[in-house]
Structures are given as structure tokens and as C-alpha cells.
Amino acid sequence: MSNIPEVRPSVELPPEVHVVASRPEEHPWRISLWQIVRFSIVGAINTSIDILTLNILLWRFPTHNANLLLLYNSIAYIFGALNSFALNKYWTFKHKQAISRSELLRFAFVNIIGILCNDLIIWSVANFLHPFIANTLLWANLSKGCAIVGTAAVSYFGMRLLVFTNRDLSSPALTVTARTTKAFAGKHNTTGNDFHQVRSELNGGKISIKHSLSVIMPAHNEESVIAATVHDVIDALSTWLEDFEVIVINDGSKDQTRAIVEDFTTIDPRVRLINHPVNLGYGAALVSGFESITKDLVFFMDSDGQFDICDLARFFPFIDEYNAVLGYRIDRQDTWVRKLNALGWKLLVRFVFGLHVRDVDCAFKLYWAKFFHEHRLETRGAMINTEILYKFTRAGYTYTQVGVRHLPRHGGKATGAKPAVIARAFREMFVYARKWHREEHG
């Protein structure tokens, strides 16, 4: 291997590919055991989110006021409901149609009916059992248990028959359209000619950056896209800067990601590989990269090919005025599950930490490296972006925000919506929010 292009995939895709998949017939009253199991798991997750959110609110803003407690409970219930909608729609009932207003209204209606049924059942059972059970604790818990079971049945059939029922079963086939990144960029160019101007100036060598730059790229099982992504980064930076380094952190990949990056390191000394033998988490990968930077500026982006490095050119004019330039995704190309989870997380982060950032977890950000030399990062999961921004703003640093394109994923597999990843993020939020609050206030 003697040059970079040899490790870059060169497969040309047609501008548009149609895939036709037959849709299995489904009866609305048919009950699947695994569907009930999935529904039960979602219910347990929702309850955990509800309780955790409520306790975070009570810890952050203690109160003995019943009305305020009711408000906290409502906020916590909404977070659980958002998660319930996403997981039940796309996982429990496998309902792939786009979200509609009528679907949301039906979902709200079923939840209201569920609350009313819960109150009615617990009141009826409590009155029935009162003459027979003298123990107050046993009487109350039996009544509550009956209410939970009854409401779960109402919720399941409401979701199954009213909210997420497939109404278009007569359609013989489902057509899925897949477009290349090039076609997507042309169709969704939301900022006029700016993106095309950036690329033309890049090709003409008109953009010149006086600062040195470290690029951090976490990677986990990205063998299908990592070569093209690294190649594009090197190609762009070679035109813009005289001094840069690309640090790829292989976070326990089980495919050929490590080997592909090692090929780059043998032919270009500006590319460095940090290897985690096992998967330590997104935050741990970023921290390993931050601890290895040697340049003036540090920029990090994902290795999955969902960002275009050319968008970074529009960040540089701001970096001498601000301490950071934060990207936010334009027309985010993710599933509704990830979008809803991201919305709930964003609102919770805003409430707990007071961060008013448009896209907290957008993996396309440019900082002065000085911040990472002076501040120790503690989280190792998906909380890492929240921690960086919290400590960054607390230290008095400034930032501006710039929109960037978000492209469809063409390889690899997203892991951010895995229950284990979400649970770790909530755990880190609860632990470190409390820790940082104590450190600030004694």
C-alpha cells in the first residue's frame, strides 16, 4: 500500500435505488407473546425513567409543596410517555409509518383513559377489600397492584388497536427509497450556496487556517465507512492547514476498523491510532483522544460518515472571536426513536444543568485545546457532551453555533439508542450532577 486512495472504497452507487419488500398480513386482534414481553419491558423502562426524573427534580429543587410535587410528577410522566411512544411504536408494535398528528392525539387519549382507569380500579378494589383486610399496608398494595394490572391491559389494547394499528394493510407492497449522500446533499441544501462555495474554495485552495488542529474521531465497528471518512478528513485538512493530526480511537471494534486505520498510520504520520481492546464507551473514547492532543485547536466528529468535513470550513472564521464553535444538525437523518429520545434528553439537560444549546450531542464541535488541558473530564458514556458544555460554560468560555448537514448512514450500526447506553447516561447524570452541585456549593 503506497498511497491513501488505495484504502478508500471506490464503489459508485446509482443516484436512486428502489427496494420493494412485501408486507405481511396482520390481524389487529392477534396477540403475540413476544409483543406482550416487549410491552412489559417498555413499561418497566418507562417506570424507571418516570421515577428517576422525579427524583432528579426533587434533588435539584427540593419541595414539600403538594402542588409543586404534582408539577414534578407531571414532568416525569411526560418523559416516560415520550419514551413509551417511541419504543412502543417502533419496537413493541413494529409500526413503521411516519408519525402523524392523529396518532399523537390517539396516544394522548389512551394515556388519559389509562389514568382514569387506574384511579377507578384502585378506588373500586379498595372499597371491595376494605371489610376483609385489616392490614392497611397490605390493603393499599393489593389495591394498587390490581390497578396496575388493569391499567396495563387497557394501555396494551389501546396502543394495539387504536394508536399503532396498521390502517393500510390493503397495500400490496412497501417501497423504500435509498439515496446516495450526493443526492441527499443536493436535495437538502438548506443554507443556499454556502456549502457549494465551501467545496469550490476547498478545491481551489483559497481557504487557509493559521492555527494547528487536532481531529478526534471515535470509531466502533465502522469498517464499511472508516476508510472513506479518514481519507476525506486528510484530503480537506491538507488543503486548509499546514499543521494537523488525526487521532482515531478504536473503541473495542470487533470488525476490521483497527486494521484499516493502522494502514493509514503506516503511510501518513499525521494519522494516529489509539486502541481500546474492549468497548469502554463514547465518552471514554473522546477522553482518550483529548488526552493525546498536541495542537492549538481540537475538533471532534463521528467516524460513521454522517457528517461532511467540508462544513468545518465555515467554523474557522468564528474561532478567533469565540472559545468554541458548536455544530447543530440540519434535518437530522435519524429514526424517530433517536429523535424523540434526543428531545427528551435535551429538555432534561436544559432543566438540570441550565444548558441552552441547540444540539447538545451533535458530534461536530470545534474548541480551543486549552480547555481540555485545564479541565479533567469524568464521565465516560453518552453524558460526555453535557459534561464538556457544563464545565465549559461554568468556566466562563464563550461559543457560537453553526448549522451542519447530517447525512444518511451508509454503513455500520448506531448504538446510541441501546437501553444500556441510555441507562448509563441517566446514571452518570444523576451521580455527577449531584457531585458537581456539592463541589460548587460546598
Image (spheres, rainbow, N blue to C red):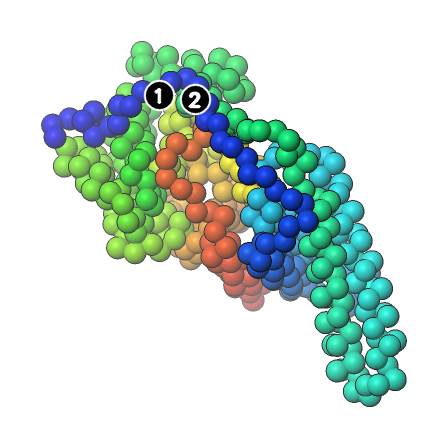
Name the secondary structure under disc 1.
loop
Residue 377 position within the rendered picture, expressed as x and y whole percent measured from the top left: 41, 54
| Residue drawn at the location 81% of the way across and 69% of the way down | 122
| Residue drawn at the location 54% of the way across and 42% of the way down | 338
Residue 138 position within the rendered picture, expressed as x and y whole percent measured from the top left: 75, 82
Instruction: Count residues near mark 2 (Cα–Cα under 10 Å), then give few for <14, some for 14-19, many for 20+.
Output: few
Closest to the observer, 90 or 284: 90
- Label 1 near label 2: C-beta < 8 Å? yes
Q: Amino acid at mark 2?
A: Val
Name the secondary structure under disc 2.
strand
Q: Quadrant of residue 413?
A: top left
Residue 324, placed above or below residue 209: below
Residue 93 position within the rendered picture, expressed as x and y whole percent measured from the top left: 60, 47
Report the residue that reaches farthest toward the left.
Answer: 2
User: Which disc number belongs to residue 130?
Assistant: none
The C terminus lies in quadrant? bottom right
Closest to the observer, 106 or 248: 106
Circle 1 is placed at which residue position?
A: 13
Circle 2 is placed at which residue position?
A: 17
Whether residue 19 sits left or right of residue 216 in the image: it is right
